[in-house]
Structures are given as structure tokens and as C-alpha cells.
Image: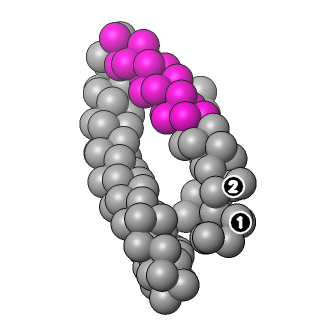
């Protein structure tokens, strides 16, 4: 049986770091330091979470390949947790759009 794991394109660490740095510098240059710190924190957390998630995913894939029957359940739980994390990030970012586009008074 052929097992194929399909993962949609995800930014790698360099892209996350560069995007976070550009956003942080842009808002800091504009004088919006609270937003700049927020972007830096989101980027740092995303980098940490990505590494954590990929380590766990690799461990569970190895366990599954070694015959651990519970590994599939743990992989499914990781998958759902990752989707929930992405949904929370999306809601937070979309919710902040009015504050990001508004000019400070």
C-alpha cells in the first residue's frame, strides 16, 4: 500500500522571519510601536509553533511506520489542532484589519 502525505504550500522559516521583520520595521517606522511589537510576537510564535508541530508530526509518522496503532489517532489530533490554530490566527488577523489600516490620530 502506498501512503502519500500531501501538505499544502507552507511558508518556511525564512519566509516567516522575513515577513515578520518587514511588517515590524514598516509599522515601527510609521510610529505604530504597539502594532510592530504585535507583529513581531505573532511571527515569533508562528516560528516556534511550526517547529513544534513539525517535530511532533515527524515523531508520529515514524511511530505509525513502526506499527504503533495509536499513532494514527495522534496524527489526526495533531491535524485538527493545527487547523484550529490556523483558524484562530485567521480570525485574529482579519479582526485586526480595521486597526491596521486606520491612520493613528
Which label number is shown at residue 97?
A: 2
Q: Is residue 8 visible?
A: no
- Gap in Å between the C-alphas at discs 2 and 1? 6 Å
Toward which corner of the image does residue 68 lie, by quadrant? top left
Residue 6 in percent (x, y) is at 63, 43
- 10 Å crowding of disc 1: few (<14), some (14-19), many (20+): few
Q: Which residues are magenta?
A: 70-88
Residue at position x 30%, y 37% from top?
56
* Residue 78 counted in the magenta span: yes
Element type at marker 1? helix
Residue extending furthest toward the bottom: 29
Residue at position x 64%, y 57% from top?
99
* Residue 84 counted in the magenta span: yes
Element type at marker 2? helix
Question: Is 33 placed above or below 51 here?
Answer: below
Q: Which corner quadrant holds the N terminus?
A: top right
Question: Is 37 placed above or below 88 here?
Answer: below
Of residues 28 and 83, the one drawn nearer to the viewer in this rendering = 28
Residue at position x 62%, y 70% from top?
105
Q: Is residue 38 visible?
A: yes
Specify how the rendered protein is coloured.
one colour
- 10 Å crowding of disc 2: few (<14), some (14-19), many (20+): few
In the displayed structure image, the side of residue 62 where residue 104 appears, left or right = right
Of residues 9 and 91, the one drawn nearer to the viewer in this rendering = 91
Of residues 49 and 34, the one drawn nearer to the viewer in this rendering = 34
Which label number is shown at residue 101?
A: 1
Which label number is shown at residue 48?
A: none
Amino acid at each position: 500500500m502506498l501512503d502519500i502525505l500531501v501538505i499544502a504550500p507552507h511558508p518556511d522559516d525564512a519566509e516567516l522571519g522575513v515577513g515578520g521583520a518587514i511588517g515590524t520595521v514598516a509599522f515601527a517606522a510609521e510610529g505604530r510601536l504597539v502594532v510592530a511589537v504585535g507583529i513581531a510576537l505573532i511571527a515569533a510564535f508562528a516560528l516556534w509553533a511550526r517547529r513544534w508541530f513539525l517535530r511532533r508530526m515527524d515523531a508520529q509518522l515514524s511511530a505509525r511506520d513502526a506499527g504503533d496503532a495509536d499513532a494514527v489517532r495522534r496524527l489526526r489530533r495533531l491535524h485538527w489542532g493545527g487547523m484550529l490554530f490556523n483558524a484562530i490566527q485567521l480570525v485574529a488577523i482579519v479582526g485586526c484589519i480595521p486597526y491596521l489600516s486606520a491612520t493613528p490620530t
